[in-house]
Image (cartoon, coloured by chain):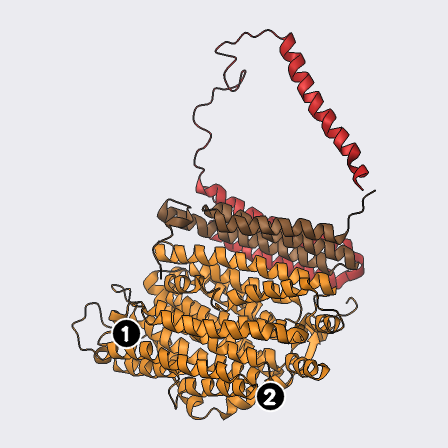
Chain colours: A orange, B red, C brown
Amino acid sequence: MPAGFSAADFFYILPELVLTGGALLVLVVDVLTSRQQRPLLGWLTVGVLLVTTLTLLPFSDANVVVSRGLLAIDGFAFFFKLIFLLTAIVTVLMSSSYIEVEELRAGEYYFLILCATLGMMFMASGIDLVTIFIGLETMAVAFYILTGLLKPNRRSNEAAVKYFLLGAFSLGILLYGMSMLYGLSGTTNLRELATVLATQERSALLIVALILVVGGVGFKIAAVPFHMWAPDVYEGAPTPVTAFLSVGSKAAAFAMLLRIFTEGLPFLAEVWQPMFWVLAVVTMTVGNLAALTQSNIKRMLAYSSIAHAGYVLIGVVANSSRGITALMIYLMLYVFMQLGAFAVVVMLRRHDVVGDELKDLSGLYFRYPVAACAMLFFMLSLGGIPPTAGFMGKFWLFSAAIESGYIWLAVIGVLNSAISLYYYVRVVVFMWIREEVLGSPITASPAMVVALTVALAGAVIFGVYPRPLFELAELSVQSFGGVVAAAEAISYR
Amino acid sequence: MLEAYVPILLFVLVAIGFAIFTLVFASLLYPERYSKVKLEPYECGIEPETDARDRYSIRFYLVAMLFVIFDVETVFMFPWAVIMDELALFGLIEMIVFLFILVVGYVYAWRKGALEWT
Amino acid sequence: MLEITPSHYMVLSAALFMIGVIGVMVRRNIIIIFMSIELMLNAVNVNLAAFSQQWQHVTGQVFAIFVIAVAAAEAAVGLGIILAFYRNKETVNIDEMNVMRW
């Protein structure tokens, strides 16, 4: 073996290796089996994801840098990888019936989901600009295809074209910023970058590079004013893909954001904190106001997810261990709330009903009471009503902001939550309207029942008893280099 | 500083001068006798039948895309080949793994009929 | 003779990058927009190669190779997506992408 590599490098990326092998397996099995056996692929994919999760568990308290400083296997990465795997599992579970109705090619679909998950895992682990970039693109390219999978559907085509063009454009901007960072410091490793930049004069070029990177990352988290793609893409993409996109890709982008800014650029914190402050406020407000007028559920949830990105940015602005803990908890809770809501929307899609307009929800309580009650809970949770999971998440985020001295940010956040209640409650009102509705009855496949149960259980349990989650997040943050770097930056000043 | 560009300037002047000179000199020498045959695009070839700006079959795109992907992956083999001695067996195994993943993709494309022309 | 310094490369790559950005913003043909984006990525490659030379190590070149490979993958996927769009819509003009708005 060449210098700098050892068997341990491969041991620590075991989950990623398993996932890669699993993805290839799905592709091969798809080629070898006939069309009738396709439902098996879904369960095979879930199996691959579960095995990956099992191999991930031993690394919960690891804290090492492997592969010549390309990857960090620490608690932070562990927590985010759990989020991605959980999201992928629930997404796959809710996909099977949708794939049948839309007549998608199951093999490609599941393979791309696994690829996207793999990319996210590298984004969370990467502490080198190259690894982060590769992870980002593995995820993004898979999502471009997933968005356009409904080939005869014009909305899906359009969404894919828009996502692809704007995604590639933002990638160009991000990469240009990264190349400038490399030029100024002579390293692509984020931790080395932090030490090199700490001793340097702050040049104008560095600020330009910072702005470019903020723009590129802002696109990926769909922060206003880089959000134009999100509503169209969320509306046009296949519904389970939208769910995966709004939860998984957003969480991955936040992992990347934290790695780059708190680990790589802690000494510029006073420059990027105000930028993210502005982004957070604008994102929350625009997202919530735009969501008020939507009649399409997927589009409404898209704007709501933009608004949630704004809330999560509060944790970045706070830039303290408490802020990052709150951010991670919020993203985990968001998995359950958002995926649950989307699972109900997926159920509305039948052979004869497209089912993504608000009026398609009408009378859901009388047709499928369990789904309606679950949806009620998810909506209240997204709106942040106590004692739901969403309330706990927001509570920690806002208190972290106050602790770091951003009282106004917390106030704006609370006001925004109040606005958001209007459109979440509107969904609930539709479900309880008794109205003559057309279309075949709503049914749930066994996989869908499992997906909905997982989402509901997570949202309920962590709303009432969040302690284990909180402890896990706190433990994860302790080993996160960004927090250490942030503390050093403060003492340096 | 600017003197460095003098040779380039000279070169450009000579190039332009040569082009003008040949055009003018030739037009003084040759007689102008046009005929139908001479005005055709290909004086001694097959007559063009349709406009060149025609739609291509979509299959060309599919083949082109597959080519682009598998073609660019070879870029990773150059750095590997340069230090192959140093990497020894480890490098060889890594490259085999890399190629294996590519082959799986290739087999998938093949079995899904992406390589068939009709 | 005139020496070419890293700043020359930076000016070149900045110019390429700006041409790309302006192309994305003003052109209406999807294919041309996509070509402008490729131009931006190539500006990044120029930057990386120049800095790699400046710092005298190969990290930048490795980065550039990855950018090239990813750009190729994106090109293949992008052309596929654009073709699917064209089959339904018979146009590659971005102004006619109007099924969804607001």
Q: The residue tagged with tag 2: helix, strand or loop?
A: helix
Packing grade of label 1 (10 A; few <14, some 14-19, many >=20) is some
Q: Which mark is residue A443?
A: 1
Label 2 sits on what residue type? Leu
Quarter residue A148 falls in: bottom left
Towards the viewer: B101 or A392: A392
Looking at the image, is mark 1 or mark 2 earlier in the sequence?
1
Q: Is residue C70 visible?
A: yes
Q: Nearer the viewer, residue A268 or C40?
A: A268
Q: Which mark is residue A475?
A: 2
The alpha-carbon separation of the residues under discs 1 and 2 comes to: 41 Å
Quadrant of the image for the C terminus of chain B? top left
Q: What's the residue at 41%, 70% (across, down)?
A: A286
Which one is in front, A37 or A323?
A323
Residue B98 on image: x %, y %: 64, 59
Chain bearing tag 2 is A
Closer to viewer: mark 1 or mark 2: 2
Is A63 positioned to the left or the right of A354 in the image?
right
Q: Could you tell me residue B23's position as x and y percent?
A: 64, 17
Q: Secondary structure at mark 1?
A: loop
- Label count reads 2
Q: Residue at x 63, y 56 (%)?
A: C67
Asked if badge 1 and badge 2 are on a common chain, one would say yes
Chain letter belonging to callout 1: A
Residue A458, picture quadrant: bottom left
Kindly identify the residue that appears in the image at 42 percent across and 73 percent down.
A285
Q: Is residue A456 left or right of residue A83?
A: left
